[in-house]
Image (tube, rainbow, N blue to C red):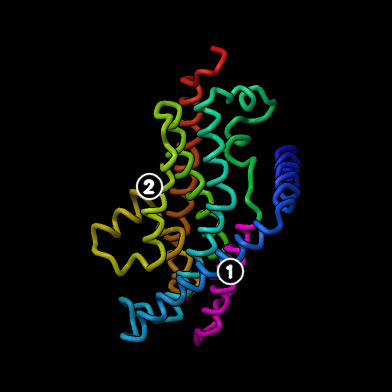
């Protein structure tokens, strides 16, 4: 509860800061709408020439697109702003202000900032998802909905852990301004169901960089392609990556050199 109160304080301050620049807020929101429309238009154009993408029909692929847009919003609203600030702190030697705080340093460094206008992407993604569901002949059952929500939580943890595993290397390699591009390269593949890719790429996106558990697997469960092993594996992957990024952070902090040391 203490950390939750701290987080709410962080985000309240971020919200007030973001709303000081309302023109920027509306401009960012407009760009988010254009980007979401572009994603949907690209898929729609593809389906003008075919009725299936692998074994996925239009509404099902649109469901994956909705999840992609929503989770891209999560990355750009919470993770990306903190990545940029963390790199600056390490480069300038001002991580002292974080390490000396009476809260967990990883929590503070990775969750303090938020770009509230990027929440528009999350809302757009949810809207596309609901629109895709309305096109489907059958509605998801309650067990499928609960499994879907759990998998979405696992997806957020997976994205957070992958981001932190990448960015923590900044303690050794300070020039990492474009490190998020590596994650985006893999995440872009999540715009489409991973089952349409060759076997070797499906293996990479499921085991090595488990982006499949961010978009494809939650969508499949929501569509009734329910496999209990999905939930177990997603939970194991999320927990394993989270523990790995925490352990890596604690190890890396030992190599930090402040501006005064």
Q: Residue at x 53, y 52 (%)?
A: 75
- Find the residue positioned furthest to the top: 261
Residue 260 lies, with reference to residue 97, above or below; the image says above
Q: Where is residue 165, by image quadrant?
A: top left
Q: Secondary structure at mark 1?
A: helix
Q: Main secondary structure of the magenta part?
A: helix
Q: Which mark is residue 182?
A: 2
Q: Residue at x 45, y 43 (%)?
A: 241
| Inter-mark Cα distance, 1 to 2 | 24 Å
Q: Which residue is mark 1?
A: 124
In this view, the residue in front, 185 or 136, is: 185
Crowding at dot 1, Cα within 10 Å, few <14 / some 14-19 / many 20+, comes out as many
Q: Is residue 26 magenta?
A: no
- Find the residue positioned furthest to the front: 23
Q: Which region is colored magenta? A: 117-146
Residue 16: image location, x then y, percent: 76, 49
Q: Is residue 125 magenta?
A: yes
Q: Could one spot residue 175 in this view of the protein? A: yes
Crowding at dot 2, Cα within 10 Å, few <14 / some 14-19 / many 20+, comes out as few
Q: Secondary structure at mark 2?
A: helix
Tell which circle, 1 or 2, labels the residue nearer the N-terminal end: 1
Which quarter of the rendered picture does the N terminus lie within?
A: top right
Q: Could one spot residue 147 in this view of the protein? A: no
Residue 250: image location, x then y, percent: 51, 27
Residue 102: image location, x then y, percent: 70, 26
In this view, the residue in front, 225 or 169, is: 169
């Amino acid at each position: 509860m203490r950390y939750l109160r701290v987080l709410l304080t962080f985000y309240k301050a971020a919200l007030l800061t973001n709303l000081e620049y309302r023109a920027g807020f509306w401009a960012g929101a407009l760009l988010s709408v254009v980007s979401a429309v572009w994603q949907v238009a690209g898929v729609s154009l593809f389906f003008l020439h075919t009725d299936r993408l692998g074994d996925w029909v239009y509404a099902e692929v649109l469901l994956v697109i909705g999840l992609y847009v929503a989770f891209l919003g999560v990355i750009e609203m919470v993770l990306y702003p903190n990545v940029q600030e963390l790199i600056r702190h390490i480069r300038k030697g001002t991580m002292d202000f974080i390490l000396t705080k009476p809260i967990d340093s990883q929590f503070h460094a990775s969750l303090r900032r938020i770009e509230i206008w990027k929440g528009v992407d999350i809302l757009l993604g949810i809207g596309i998802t609901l629109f895709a569901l309305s096109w489907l002949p059958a509605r998801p059952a309650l067990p499928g909905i609960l499994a879907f929500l759990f998998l979405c939580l696992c997806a957020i943890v997976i994205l957070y852990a992958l981001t932190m595993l990448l960015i923590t290397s900044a303690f050794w390699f300070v020039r990492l301004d474009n490190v998020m591009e590596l994650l985006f390269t893999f995440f872009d593949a999540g715009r489409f169901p991973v089952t349409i890719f060759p076997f070797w790429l499906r293996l990479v996106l499921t085991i090595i960089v488990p982006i499949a558990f961010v978009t494809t697997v939650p969508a499949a469960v929501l569509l009734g392609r329910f496999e209990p092993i999905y939930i177990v594996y997603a939970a194991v992957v999320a927990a394993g990556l989270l523990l790995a990024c925490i352990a890596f952070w604690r190890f890396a902090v030992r190599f930090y050199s402040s501006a005064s040391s």
